[in-house]
Image (spheres, rainbow, N blue to C red):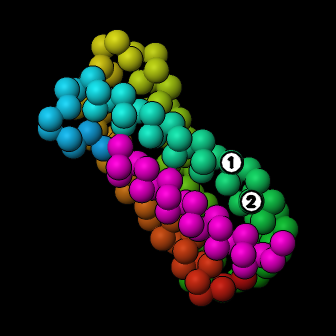
Amino acid sequence: MNMQLIDAFTLTFSVVSVFLLVLGLPLVKNLNTRKNLERHGALTIVALLLQTILVFLVMIPSFIKKLDAIVALSLMPSFNIWLHIGLGLFALVSGFAYVGLWLIFYSSGMRCARAKKYMIPTMIAWIIAIISGALTFLLEFM
């Protein structure tokens, strides 16, 4: 399959995964807190699984295949790629940590009001990682 098509597919599904996170935010006031938490947790799990599949099936093999080209890049394109990798890994690992904690402490509501101060920076990191990945794709640095 054409690499540009694979990259476009990956970018599209990465954006869908962030959309699932945003869609899952517990903002609906007419639902009770438990339903909000359940919807948010379920959509977060789907987003994380989707992103994890993309990382292992597309992104890691692409990184390995293009490592020499990445190392040879000038400063700005190289910074953008490493930013994408670093923030993406941080967001993915943090997301799994939050989901794990939610599943373990589900009955207590996980005290999401306190955890929110950590979840928002993680979501912002995920969005920035996708934007930097989109820049890499759209500007065809590699």
Is 65 on the left or on the right of 125, as rendered?
A: right
Q: Tell whether 134 sits left or right of 71.
A: left
Residue situated furthest top in the rendering: 107
Placement of 139 over or under 2, stated as above or below: below
- Residue 58 shows which numbered tag? 2
Kindly identify the residue that appears in the image at 84 percent across and 72 percent down.
1
Q: Nearer the viewer, residue 48 or 63?
A: 48
- State the quadrant of the C terminus: bottom right
Residue occupying image coordinates x 50% and y 53%: 17
Q: Amino acid at mark 1?
A: Ile
Work out whether residue 83 can be spotted: no
Q: Is residue 119 above or below residue 100?
A: below
Q: Amino acid at mark 2?
A: Val
Query: The residue tagged with tag 1: helix, strand or loop?
Result: helix
Tell me the crowding category of disc 2: few under 14, some 14 to 19, or many 20 or more residues within 10 angstroms, Cα based. Answer: some
Q: Is residue 70 magenta?
A: no
**Can you name the residue that lies furthest to the front here?**
30
Work out how far the residue at label 2 is from the one at label 1, CA to CA, in angstroms: 8 Å
Which region of the structure is painted magenta? 1-24
- Image mark for residue 28: none
Res 59 quadrant in image? bottom right
